[in-house]
Amino acid sequence: MAAASGRQAGGGAGSWLARYRRQGREALELALTDVPGYAEWRRFDPGPRAPLDERYAALPALTKHELRAHFPAGFVPRQRELGPGLAAGEVEFAQTSGSTGDRVTLVFNPAWWEESERAAWGLNRHARRVADGRHREAVLASPRCVGPGYSPRPLSVAERTIGRHLYVNQKLNPAAWTAADVRRMAQEINDYEPVAIEGDPAYLAAFCRQAGAWGTRMWQPRIIFLTYTFPSRLYRRQIAAVFRAPQVSSYGSTETGHVFMECEAGRLHQNVEHCRVDFLPWLFRHGGPQRGRILVTVFHNPWFAVLRFDIGDVVRLDDRGPCPCGRGQGMALRAVEGRVSDVTFDREGNAVSVDDLDALLADLPGLAGWQLELPRPGQMRLRMLAAPGGRRPGSAQARERLRRLYGDRVRVEAAVEKALLHELSGKIRFVRTAYPVDHAALWRSKR
């Protein structure tokens, strides 16, 4: 189902919908006629006389495997010359911030990215008021995901200030921070006085736990953008204890730009000016037709053609009627529920998303963070972080909750740990499964 068709469209067939469909058709035609990486896709296309949604539905999904296989120029339109574009600074090679197996190098167009971000700001009242593309922004995330990159030596503030952004963190995994690191980051934020803070929720929450425990006085930005990973309920509460600004979930990827933005009413709205989104529902037993995965087609990037990219996350459509914010263009989501690769299965064989687990665990007294490891089938280990200076989360209570979900046949361990494990990228996954799982069974019938 396409974002702008049927009940997902909202707002009627106005000028935005005509423009949206025109841009979707132009992206499709460009990819199939002028982009080498899609040469094998042409045989699937029913042709220009077929309805646009039917043409999109007939095509495969684009994955990171294809992006790697055709790098560097396979997804650059033939009318563009990569060498001169790189020399002129119109594009650059950029590595995505995924985990070890997910990372890929892309042809990245900074101007397209900035336009996508600017359009997404318009989907939230708070962001629209304060973000103008010139505002100061402090960023707290893995140095392998953002900024000047990871450095074994400490970088100066000048070296970590790029344009309007100050990148304050220099270490992989917040567990590696010393008291001096946290005080330095706090002082840099206070000195910089950013209008916005952008953060990986795991990193920003860890900073807030420590700064809050010490009673550190913090500069108050006007908005907090949460991105990079799933924003746990625990993390949102910890961030709110230090920063009073509205928290806004910004969703997208390096490949696709900014795809959804959380509005002031808490729903995620599609950035229809910059992308098409196709929703593929899961089977009913796993939460369909409201829960599924999405494929993203990018508009306005003249250097890198992205068509039906499988972004790899679980989403849940919003079916509560018109949004109180008044926006009705494109698809609306109730939630992004974490990575498809982090989905587990309960005692009945039904899907359990990261969001499901977070809802199950987030109210455990004393819990500051969690991570579920699955070293082999039938075995689980829950890593728990304890809130500073408070009651330690109960291992027995955590095990009982997980057993009720997964059944008594599963061996469940739970323990308070000093740290959650991070990936090569520095991101901290909520579920780490060490054996292959056929997640395609979520949407593919066995018959």
Image (cartoon, rainbow, N blue to C red):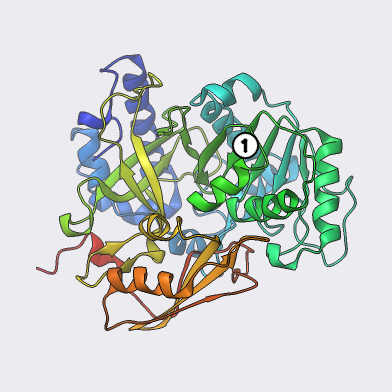
Amino acid at the residue labelled 1: Ile
- Say which quarter of the image contains residue 219: top right
181 versus 24 height, above or below: below
The residue singled out by tag 1 in the image is: 224
Tell me if 157 is positioned left or right of 258 in this view: right
**Compared with residue 129, is residue 425 higher up or lower down, i.e. above or below?**
below
List the single residue furthest toward the top.
15
Task: Using the image, determine if residue 266 lies above or below residue 384.
Answer: above
Figure check: 188 above or below 320 = below
- Image quarter where the N terminus lies is top left
Q: Residue drawn at (68%, 65%), measured in percent from left and top?
A: 173
Specify whether 157 is left or right of 427. Answer: right
Q: Is residue 438 visible?
A: no
Most foreground residue, 88 or 406: 406
Nearest to the observer: residue 132 or residue 352: 352
Instruction: State the residue at coordinates (72%, 57%).
Output: 143
Residue drawn at x 73%, y 33% as measured from the top left: 220
Image x and y of residue 430, in percent: 49, 64
Q: Where is residue 439 in the image (x, y as percent from the top left)?
A: 31, 67
Question: Dot 1: few (<14), some (14–19), or many (≥20) neighbours within 10 Å?
Answer: many
Taking the image as drawn, is residue 19 in sight? yes
Question: Which structural element holds mark 1?
Answer: strand
Residue at the farthest front position: 391
Residue at 75% across / 62% down in the picture?
A: 171
Image-based side of 246 in relation to 355, left or right: right
Residue 149, given in percent of the width and then of the height, sits at 75, 57
The tally of labels here is 1
